[in-house]
Amino acid sequence: MRSLAPAALFKPALTSAATLSALLFLPALLAAAPGAHAQDFPTKPVRVVTPFPAGSGPEVALRLVAEKLSRLWGKPVIVDNRPGASGFIAIEAIKRASPDGHELLQMDNAQMAAQPFLFKKLPYELLRDFEPVTPILRNYFFVTVPAGSRYKTMGDLVASAKAGPGQVNYGSWFVGSPGHIGAAMLEASTSTRMTHVPYKEMSQLYVAVGNQEVDWAFGSAASAGAMQRAGRTRFLAVAAPRRVAGFPEVPTVAESGGPAGFELSAWTALLAPKGTPRAVVEKIQKDVATVLSEQDVKDKYSAMYYEPYVLNSEQFLQQLRTDSQRYGDTIRRLNISLD
């Protein structure tokens, strides 16, 4: 999914700073859009394009929502997988679709908040091309260490990093990944300097942690869970505001002696082409919230270590502001680019 798009796909986009400024200061995103009556929607099958491959966690979670919406709306909701090129293939498929709510896009927060800073040119501008509709899921990252690690708390890890700048190392699944950026955020919040060791694949990364080739890495319960369940690694802390379901024994970063308020999460959301009527956007928000409140959906999400996550337009915009500022500040400090 993270391979670079061909240069021919790119079109001039906002600079990183301008993108962040738009997220911070564009109240027009919330302005009412003209057109369709919500009670008439949908009038035909709905297609949701996803950049995630079939069988991946975010894609499976989306299919659960699509199946429920199909029943609620009485119209098929079709999931269309378009993986590859850092999500740009899926984005291009929806960017110029008819803005009536029948064509939607799934994106993750890295694509929405980090890519404008990681790429000098993008084939899209988030607020110009899309109407944010609602997130649908969220999960938090764990600080993963070898089972025999000398670190028993986040306080231990931070103290070691302070004592020997650059001597503590961490892995991630590639340069510019959420794991890399999140670790850089942790460095900034603890005034430490650690050494980044990038890997080509997630599976290689957590094997490396288990083999004590790196001191630690951020990982989700899904991506890092196999090695943890095998007893090769353990979760030192979770970068969340509270302990998460399924892991009541794992403290938060703050509880474990790390910086207060430190969070790192992944979430995916639905977006519609720019100009989709506000009434339609609000109906989709409401109906997705209804679907995600159903107990069987909650149970299936929990089994995948996700939590339902629904926001209205104003809340969604605020979340984008927050993530964009954090990602943007960190990527500029790292001075990295993926094109």
Image: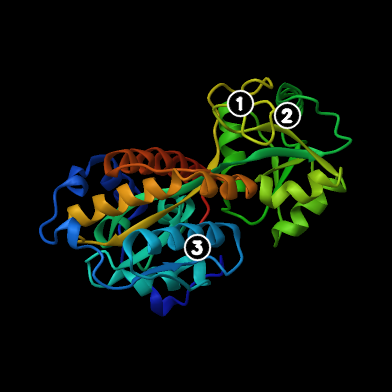
In-front residue for pair 301/71: 71
* Label 1 close to label 2 by CB (< 8 Å): yes
In-front residue for pair 336/92: 92
Q: Earlier in the sequence, mark 3 or mark 1?
A: 3
Disc 2/disc 3 C-alpha distance (Å): 42 Å
Q: Earlier in the sequence, mark 2 or mark 3?
A: 3
* Label 3 close to label 1 by CB (< 8 Å): no
Q: Is residue 222 visible?
A: yes
Q: Is 156 on the left or on the right of 262, as rendered?
A: right
Q: Amino acid at mark 3?
A: Arg
Residue 161, labelled with which disc?
2
Q: Is 222 on the left or on the right of 20, as rendered?
A: right
Image quarter of residue 175: bottom right
Q: Residue at x 19, y 56 (%)?
A: 38
SS label for mark 3: helix
Disc 3/disc 1 C-alpha distance (Å): 40 Å
Q: Residue at x 31, y 49 (%)?
A: 285
10 Å crowding of disc 1: few (<14), some (14-19), many (20+): some
